[in-house]
Amino acid sequence: MLHALTSARLEFIVDDTSGSLEVVHLGSPVGRVDPTSFSAPIPEGGIDHLAPISVLAEAAAGWMGKPGLRLHRGGTVVFPRLDPSTVTSDGSSLRAVACDPATQVSVTILATLHDAGVLELVVELRNDGAPLTVDEVLVTVPVPHASEVLQFSGRWSDEFHPMRHPWEWGTFVVENRSGRTSATRFPLLMAGTAGFAEQTGTVTAIHLGWSGDGQVRADRLPDGRRILQAGEIFGAGEVVLDTGETHRSAPVFLAHSAEGLNGISDSFHRYVRARPTHVAAERPVILNTWEAVYFAHDLDSLSALADRAAAVGVERFVLDDGWFLGRNDDRRALGDWVVDPAKWPAGLDPLIAHVRGLGMEFGLWVEPEMISPDSELFRSHPDWALADPHHDPVRARHQLVLDLANPSAYEHIRQSLCSLLDDHDISYLKWDMNRDLVAPTDSTGRAGGRAQTLAAYRLIDEIRRAHPDIEIESCSSGGGRIDLGILARTDRVWTSDCNDALDRIRIQRGASYLIPPELMGAHIGPNRAHTTGRTHTIAFRGATAMFGHLGIEWNLLAATDDELAAVERIVSMHKAHRALLHGGRTVRIDVEDAAVSAFVVVDPDQDEAIVSVSQIATSRGLPVGPIRIPGLDLDGTYRLERLALDERRLGMAKQQPAWLEGVEISGRQLAVAGLPMPILNPETALLLHLRRR
Ligand code: GLA
């Protein structure tokens, strides 16, 4: 029998008659179907049937690709046959159960099609026999029309580079073994029709909602069929199920679009926004102290910084790294979560009271999953480091990982965090995690990466339960832990340690394929970016940070009066448009000129929009454009006005377009003919506001 889960953009149809849960369609809705319409021919020369593309592709059914399950009992291979005995579905969720008495393994596949058009797949694997080692659990779906893949890679301070590859034959794999989500091997893969772009093409996206080791794969089978797969990567012997135990896989998320990449991100954004844990639409403007003062904390200067922050309109003041016992640089003290009496003789309360008195919330940086070898904690508990007992552990940023699967270590850190929150008026934690896991093993030598990620989740969940009003930011050396698993329990990500507006345009664009702007920390940094040395105007920095969860990461005590006035203007402009910026639909625009990056944020009713056009390099041809602006009501008429962040001067030109002084224009003209662009200097941005008449 066929079972269909259907939403406006994505339909998922499975057939349970072939002896497995076969995915016969994942794509745009197809309407009424006849079961025979999915039957395919069986070519000569191979096995006597076509191994189905099942959610858990079965080696024992003749599947020649990577199987969905790899299992053994003490070296004896276990090949369960997963013929579903019951499949129940209500049109938006499906539950299929398959029990294999021969191997004493049973499987439950849970498929949920969220209203947003995002399909979530979870596998539960139960063992009723002797201890069962689970080497791999991978879900598989077909992408019959794809011939190009797009992955996102990068590194610290340079996250989210889109990387596109032709995919004719063979396997394309993104394998992450860093113990965190990773900026380098980001667990999102898109596969689409040739030349798919922001506004055109048929694309399917697969994402692993997990903050540890994992893989996303695109495989073209020897028989020509194309599939996507995703699942965790386990360490050797890491998942062993005793009799009666169940393993639950990390969720795999899928989105599909026949309208290019914008349809993919639109589905992901809608899904994230509909989650019950999602934050309120208008995010408070932050000041983060990291690049302002680094480890140099003292009450007087931080109070003065708070004064300046409040004066320019900041709503949340976040004290970054440097506040705890002896933390004068990044070589020590992780684990000693007590306020440093040398820097803070009266504790943090005087600063917190000052910040609160100015009407701002107070936030604090922590890195609970780590331990410095030079710390009181390590001196008392050297066995609490998550490290291979036989070799010297590899350090990263001079630190080791705290073994959170060790109940004593976990309890210690939980209590430390709870006391911090009980004893202080803290409404926000910037929760950092600054290193890759290297051969993570506990003190008995067992692989411990997965347990570490699960324990970190549990710790965050417990802290949130104990302090329901707290908000948490997920930071991991910038954007090293951004995924739908961590985002089920956190409220913002630190997108990148790079505050260089030019790089940020690309980084934020890359992050926008998965997450909506209100979750994306975006800060106005100092004139000269610390991580690149580049200098940008405040207008350009502001125009870039404006489109995320806005913050300031700059020592405002060193800013001139003019600069402070400009920051204040940017903050108040952001607040004036915040509901739109944090609740609207982001539509990235395909621009032929690679020197220009453009997108528009449109409110759900298409009454209002803000267009951002950034000149990221010098264009070879001038003038640029016209640029066509999608996403608006084609039959609507809009009043278009430029939003000027500081001076009104643009690039050098004898004359700029007359429409810059304000114009009334139809959504159709904007979408079809577009707007000729003014001449812009490189590393400047143009913002346009549109309101429906
Ligand atoms: C990481 C974060 C930064 C900052 C520092 C503090 O690098 O990404 O934003 O918090 O740690 O040590």
Image (cartoon, rainbow, N blue to C red):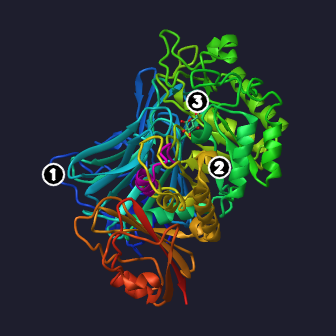
Q: Residues within 10 Å of mark 3 (few under 14, many from 20)?
A: many
Numbered circle sitting on residue 287 = 2
Task: Tell me what residue is drawn at x 69 percent, y 59 percent.
Answer: 313
Q: Residue furthest front?
A: 561
Quarter of the picture containing the N terminus is bottom left
Q: Secondary structure at mark 1?
A: loop
Disc 3, SS: helix
Residue 243 placement (x, y as % from top left)? 59, 28
Q: Amino acid at mark 2?
A: Leu
Depth check: give the residue in front, 570 or 462.
570
* Residue 625 visible somewhere in the drawing: yes
User: Do the residues under discs 2 and 3 have CB atoms within 8 angstroms?
Assistant: no
Answer whether residue 501 is magenta in the image: yes
The amino acid marked with disc number 1 is Glu
Vertical placement of residue 130 versus 652, above or below: above
Is residue 76 highlighted in magenta?
Answer: no
Point out the stretch of residues depicted in magenta: 495-509
- For marks 2 and 1, the one nearer the N-term is 1
The residue singled out by tag 3 in the image is 451
Q: Position of residue 322 (x, y in %)?
A: 65, 31
Q: CA distance from mark 2 to mark 3?
A: 34 Å
Which SS does the magenta portion mostly show? helix
With 252 as the anchor, is 358 left or right in this view?
Answer: right
Q: Which mark is residue 44?
A: 1
Residue type at mark 3?
Answer: Ala
Q: Count neighbours of disc 1 (C-alpha within 10 A) and say few if under 14, some if 14 to 19, many if 20 or more.
A: few
Ligand 1, by image quadrant, is top right
Compared with 537, 455 (above or below) is: above
